[in-house]
Amino acid sequence: MTTTHSAVLRPPAAPGPLEWLRKNLFSTWYNTVLTLLAAWVAVSGVRSILGWVFFTANWSPVAGSLKLFAVGQYPLDQIWRPGAIVLIITLLAGASWRIFGGTVRTFALALALALLVAGLLPVRMNLGLRLWFLANPILTGAGYLAGGLRLVRTRGLAVAWALTFPVTILLLLGFKDSAWLPRVATGVWGGLLLTFLLAVVGITASFPIGVLLALGRRSKLPVVKTMCILFIELVRGVPLVTILFMASIILPLFLPEQIRIDRVLRAMTGMTLFAAAYMAENVRGGLQSIPRGQEEAAKALGLNGFQTMALIVMPQALRAVIPAIVGQFIALFMDTTLAVIVGLVEILAIGRIVLNSRTDWLMLDSEVFLFIAVVFWVFTFSMSYASRRLEAALGVGKR
Amino acid sequence: MSDASEDIIICRDVHKWFDDFHVLRGVSMTIKRGEVVVICGPSGSGKSTFIRTINRLEDHQQGDIIVDGIELTNDIRNIAAIRSEIGMVFQQFNLFPHLTVLSNVTLATIWVRKWSKAKAEENAMQLLERVGIPEQAHKYPGQLSGGQQQRVAIARALAMQPKIMLFDEPTSALDPEMIKEVLDVMVELARSGITMIVVTHEMGFAREVANRIVFFDVGQIIEQNTPDEFFLNPQHERTKLFLSQIL
């Protein structure tokens, strides 16, 4: 007869930190040597980098051109306009923090804290700018409080976020012959502002277009299917630089004289279409991973084709390809730097302009490019962090 | 016209091809309201394909299928009308893994029947009670055992209050221990008077509740009879061979 354990057994305890070190890093004499060697390389590497950053490097081109890096040639007397947009975003971020919590809280807090620290820096700063910095965390707090009101609900917040977009464009662009909101030509938009605009427009527009293209490619209608395949394969077969050139130089040659599409808009269109083709293939990959039984079960319940796609197939397909989609978004964000070849001065182009603006700054490219790299890293890392959290949140119940 | 309302499913000389492969070779069958029909036969005999033509998951290329007075054609409105009258349970359950058990069951009533959420959930909870797993309502399908998943699938199909239930080998993907819990639900259902067509190899179930057993081979009905006659007195050589192998 076999005995059964009446008591539930505990899993073996995890080793303590000292035990772990001994077992993993110092188990034999050559592992000890390797550990010490690696530690020495790591410490001296970090020391020399930190030494360069804090003592050797000359940050004056970065510190002296922050306005250029932020908004490019946007006129100084109108700079409150991009400033107001950031204020709207921090306010909405506060409200979203209250309503969604979780990762949204992390981002709202990080944004508010960063702006607060910037506002408190003990450096010479225009009073208006300092007040603006400080207003941001206050608005985040206000948004957080407002998020608790009955009035503000998930749907209202979504509408507010969606409205932010046209408001941003109108505010930046202004109106012809308007006294207090004069037109600012897109030609002088630049820096991080332009990088953001290109990326946000590219991401939000390419996603739905990509989904539609993926569905079209699987369509049973031969014309739709052929058109989608043609578009996807044509665009994927051509470098982004070529598409940007086509959009901004060749396309106007075919259009009549009177129709002049704005240069920034042309670049946005080119990038959106480029990203949409890749997005379509990512989404198609997701669609193919969903077993046919899902669609059959939905149809057997009486759901129509649209409901089956929107409620059953697409949510699962998109969830399966979140890493690929976010990778695509990050690539798009970094591809915005290619807009320089059609004459747009996004942040990387600003870097070059700054370097060339004074002879004593000419040799300081390490500082300038490191700064730009860090800016890019902060945003792309945020995106991939958000994606990992999203995967975790959506993976609930899936084993 | 008592005859028309008596017969809920009428199939006349149904043919189907997968490319060149002739799967259904002239199947004719009439099923009465409230009848429980078990279809059995060797694999590849077309029995699954046949019940899938009844709710148009597969189209037939020749012959007529009339369900509850509506003829199945390519007309999308007819297909929608028929599908909302027929519940289907699959071998692989096909629950929606991204939705909770409760949402799986309420989905169709909310989106197709346009019920309010409260009404749909009340209906769903009653059905989950009926299949014996109300406590699992807020879990996801992936957290349930196979037998529980299949019972959720039955509840999901019943939510639409169908007149006909189709079962496509509902216990074939289950561990032996879980087959009984699913069969118990099906037996209870069969006794409730709903029309059922069940493709299965569970001969015990067939003997207990079926009004009629239909034996399929190479896309045709070889023999059909009451359970007693079918098991004790099979007429056809092919049926005898099949029964000798599975009993």
Image: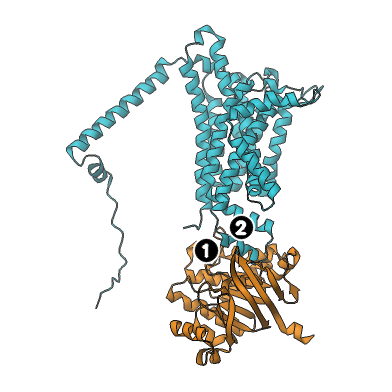
Chain shaded orange: B
Q: Which residue position holds label 2?
A: A312
| Label 2: chain letter | A
Residues A74 and B227: in front is B227
* Image-based side of B245 in relation to B109, left or right: left
Q: Is residue A345 above or below residue A313?
A: above
Q: Looking at the picture, how far across and down is residue B49, in whole percent?
A: 59, 70
* Callout 2–callout 1 Cβ contact below 8 Å: no
Per the rendering, the colour in which chain A appears is: cyan
Dot 2 amino acid type: Ile
* Image-based side of A132 in relation to B42, left or right: right
In which quadrant is the N terminus of chain A drawn?
bottom left
Image point (55%, 18%), residue name = A351
Residues A193 and A231: in front is A231
Q: Looking at the picture, how far across and down is residue A397, in whole percent?
A: 50, 58
Dot 1 amino acid type: Pro
Question: Are there few (<14), some (14-19), or many (20+) residues within 10 Å of tag 1?
Answer: many
Q: Looking at the picture, how far across and down is residue A160, in whole percent?
A: 69, 41
Q: Report the disc number at residue B141.
A: 1
